[in-house]
Amino acid sequence: MRGSVQWRQTISIAPQRARVLFRLLLLFTLLPLVELTLLVWLSAHTDWRLTMLFVIGTGVLGAWLIRSQGWRAWRRIRDELARGQMPTDSIQDGLLILIAGLLLITPGVLTDVVGVLLLVPPLRRFIRTWLKSRWQGRLQVYSFRGPGRGSTRASAPLVALAMHDRSM
């Protein structure tokens, strides 16, 4: 009986994996083609030196912005934890800043535009609320405290994250 339950779960998971693999295939094949096409078009309509300056400049800008905004997000996370608050918005901001920096470091026009847009705080807030609505009900956060034998490190809250699949 137990084997048949596992078999049914495997069948229901297989289409999800196929969708994920298809999306990854599209991401890793179409995105570089679109980026290359945009860079060639930009180079043809301006100057190749300006295109190179754009690619190198956005890479340097991305590295600088990820450092400055990333440290700001890290301080907010530490301050919220010190006040005993769960820093969910700050953690999400930090992840979006990290993604923005990685997109800016990646050579290309489309990834640079998306990276810059992720660094705009009002737009980042909008994306954060969209992500919350999308993931609501799929993630549960459990928090508990350690034994706390005089050490502040041992009594700090531990956080666990569990993801629940709605399709099953």
Image (tube, rainbow, N blue to C red):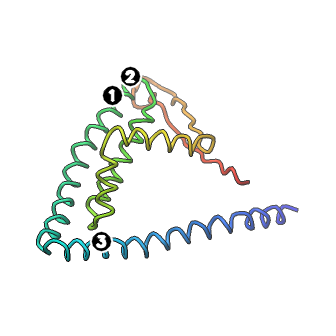
Mark toward the start of the polypeptide (3 vs 2): 3
Residue type, numbered disc 2 = Arg
Quarter assignment of residue 125: top left
Q: Residue at x 28, y 59 (%)?
A: 112
Per the model, the C-alpha gap separating discs 3 and 1 is 42 Å
Side (left or right) of 133 relative to 149:
right
Quarter assignment of residue 21: bottom right
Side (left or right) of 2 relative to 136:
right
In this view, the residue in front, 82 or 43, is: 43
Q: Residues within 10 Å of mark 3 (few under 14, many from 20)?
A: some
Look at the numbered discs 3 and 2 and tell me whether their residues touch, using CB distance below 8 Å.
Answer: no
Q: Check the image and report above or below for 13 versus 89.
A: below
Residue identifier under label 1: 79
Residue identifier under label 2: 83
Residue identifier under label 3: 38
The N terminus appears in which quarter of the rendering? bottom right
